[in-house]
Image (cartoon, rainbow, N blue to C red):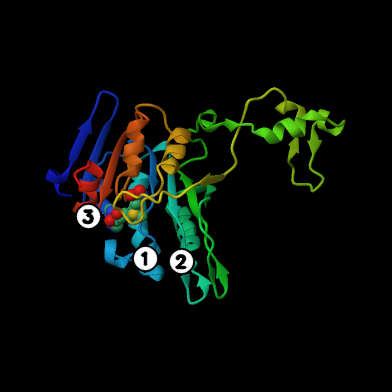
Amino acid sequence: MILSEQTHLKNSESEMRFYQGDCLDVLEQLPDSSIDLIMTSPPYADSRKNTYGGILPERYVEWFLPRAAQFLRVLKPTGTFILNIKEKVVEGERHTYVLELILALRKQGWLWTEEFIWHKKNAYPGKWPNRFRDSWERCLQFNKQRQFVMYQDAVKIPMGDWSKRRLKYLSDVDRHRDTSKAQSGFSKKVTNWLGRAQAYPTNVLHLATECTNKQHSAAFPAALPEWFIQLFTQVGDWVLDPFMGSGTTCHVAKKLERNSIGVDLHQVHVKLARGEL
Ligand SMILES: C[S@@+](CC[C@H](N)C(=O)[O-])C[C@H]1O[C@@H](n2cnc3c(N)ncnc32)[C@H](O)[C@@H]1O
């Protein structure tokens, strides 16, 4: 790490620290168990070679693992790691490197606790000879232990108009706990929803990509880190984005009064995150 490239932007509520370098080296200088949430979108295998270098799909796991070892070390035991990633199609097949990465991370000591789907709700139609447009990406959740912090009430959503229609006429079954006939083990009591203004979301996030992006070719929408930061952290906690790009995660963290650390290999991205470009 080049220490002089570190920048602290501090206001009364929160601090943003930016570092230029390979996160593998930079993170060595962070203390153990000091981060509440790692929210990141690394370079996807072999994509955008000209912008920030591509890693061959077959070498992706080998490249990622030493960096993930640092993530494991700096994350608090109750913290969460969210990995936004997608596989590419190679020779007509979806490559398996993301699946291989999940298995390798489990071997490294991570628990693969959840998978969220980011549905890009403004994706425009497209057709290739044997497939349609990919309009979703994975947000994989990893934890160090089963007991991790999660503030579910922070991401509640309005019940929506469907509930007015659904709850207008209640059957006898609706008034009792109804166990799934498919033997899934799930049950529901529809009358529990009466009088509620809000409900918990599902693990599918319907978020538009931002077309007016911030001079970075692969920025994710601010709403993506915002959702995870609210779900997994509180005011004053520390958020890390080891592949920060334009610094979206850090800027959202600051808006939500969380402290953040962002790392990027390229000076131009650090300048972008600092607001110098
Ligand atoms: C997909 S982009 C992240 C975009 C970001 N989420 C945003 O909203 O702008 C991945 C970033 O990782 C950076 N990068 C690639 N290899 C890196 C490494 N070894 N250490 C730190 N950053 C790296 C790239 O320069 C690129 O900006």
Whether disc 2's CB lies below 8 Å from ligand 1 is answered no
The dot on residue 29 is none
Callout 3: 10 Å neighbours few (<14), some, many (20+)?
some
Residue where numbered disc 1 is placed: 47
The local secondary structure at tag 3 comes to loop
Picture quadrant of ligand 1: bottom left
Residue at x 36%, y 51% (from the top left corner): 219
Q: Say whether residue 33 is visible.
A: no
Whether disc 3's CB lies below 8 Å from ligand 1 is answered yes
The dot on residue 266 is 3
Callout 2: 10 Å neighbours few (<14), some, many (20+)?
some
Task: Point out residue 141 in the picture as x, y percentages from the top left corner.
Answer: 48, 46
Q: Quadrant of residue 17?
A: top left
Q: Is residue 234 left or right of residue 122?
A: left
Tell me the distance, in whole angstroms, between the alpha carbons under discs 1 and 2.
Answer: 9 Å
In terms of sequence position, does the residue under pointer 2 or pointer 3 come before the other? 2
The kind of residue tagged 1 is: Ser
Whether the residues at callouts 1 and 2 have beta carbons within 8 Å, the answer is yes
Whether the residues at callouts 3 and 1 have beta carbons within 8 Å, the answer is no
Callout 1: 10 Å neighbours few (<14), some, many (20+)?
some
Task: Point out residue 192 in the picture as x, y percentages from the top left corner.
Answer: 73, 26
The kind of residue tagged 2 is: Lys
The dot on residue 88 is 2
The kind of residue tagged 3 is: His
